[in-house]
Image (tube, helix red, strand yellow):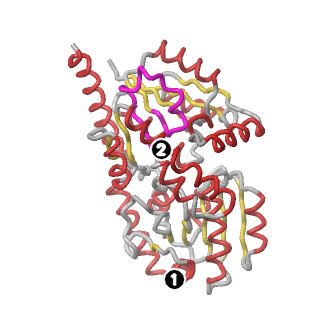
Amino acid sequence: MATRVLFLTHEPPLPLVSGARIRSYHLMRELARHGCAVSLFALMPDGTPPAEARAQLDALCERVELRPFAPSVLARRARLLADYALGRPFERRYFYDRDAARALDALLGELRPDVIVVGQLYMEAYLPPSLEAATIFDSHNVEARRVATMTRAGGLRAAMARRQVRPVAAHEAEAVGRMGRTWAVSEEEQEHFEPLAPGRVDLVPNGVDCELLPLRAAQPAGSEVLFLGRMDYGPNVDGVRHLLEDVVPHLRRRDAVVRVVGANPPPLVARWAESADLEVEVTGFVESTTPYLDSARLLAVSLRSGGGTRLKILEALARGVPVVTTTLGCEGQGLVDGHDALIADDPAQFAAAIDRLLEDDELCATLARNGRATVEERFDWRSIGNAAQESLQRLLAATAAAPAARG
């Protein structure tokens, strides 16, 4: 009988418009490829997914349960303020809904999964304590580190993040300690989690589908600088600000064009774009990032906060798009400066790296070849799926041995 695996996610994995969705979808697909009967329980904070996305999920999964989740802005803000005031981790209740919890309990009774995969801390509150031993926590990132990086950004967001660092770290540590196994996206994050759950942390990195992301045909001769990422995610918004306000003034190439591609840009992004002293286009949501990756001279990952590993970098490398990134931006991916990408943290040095790629065709070609080779060797979803399957088998062995040990 096929192993029944239920994924719990705070948003449907399709369409593939965020790193979290891309990771969840491909891990579901890979476990199904290994013969698992995969099911999905997901919230719908953005409304019902397109019919095509739902059809793809139905084709992949044994069962699909999508639950509406649309609290008012006022209710969500009230919940956040209460958590901050009381020193509680905001993830614990941010996506929690009693009706959804009851629906999950009913699904668990019908489906009786062998393994549950909890995607990020947002869904941990839905997990019945009796099923924790049969659960894999798919961390996506070390949340405590992500929140800690936000304290350096300044302003109200940084002040709120400072108050959350300790409760988030405690909540994350407690959750990792309770669950059967944890998936870490990098060796650094695996080392972070290991003391919290000795022998129960597995490396399951982020990846790319190299077959579906071929190397682009040619290196564009233009001067397009691409910033890619959802604009309702704080670290991406801060990254755009850093690029436009701190890096762009140092560029020698005043003919450079910056394209900011990502859904839900706040008004601040438009204001920063208008005040920049070179051309900046803010697209908002796009159906596909492929045309932008095809035309971009380079991808700029000017991130100063956040956690996990960036799928946008892996996708760019797979397509042969040269990358300029901060150290934090490529954290956990083991990229080598000058071989796989250009890495710079100082704004002037980041700008100099962009200038180099706008002018040096040979360097662009070298980075394109090396980047593609790196993702093929280390970050293809096929090999990552093998690691996920091996981890799942270790969990099944442990849960099978537990009753015998108690007996």
Q: Residue furthest bottom?
A: 252
- Pointer 1: residues within 10 angstroms few (<14), some, or many (20+)? some
Q: Residue 1 appears at what percent x and percent y?
A: 32, 17
Q: Residue 158 appears at what percent x and percent y?
A: 62, 58
Q: Residue 70 appears at what percent x and percent y?
A: 71, 33
Q: Residue 383 appears at what percent x and percent y?
A: 32, 46
In terms of image quadrants, where is residue 407?
top left
Q: Which residue is mark 2?
A: 23
Say which amino acid is labelled 2: Arg
Region rendered in magenta: 118-140
Which residue does the image show at 58% across and 59% down from the upper left?
A: 151
Which residue does the image show at 58% across and 22% down from the upper left?
A: 101
- Pointer 2: residues within 10 angstroms few (<14), some, or many (20+)? many
Foreground pick, 213 / 110: 110
Residue 285 is left or right of residue 138, and the answer is right
Residue 207 falls inside the magenta stretch: no
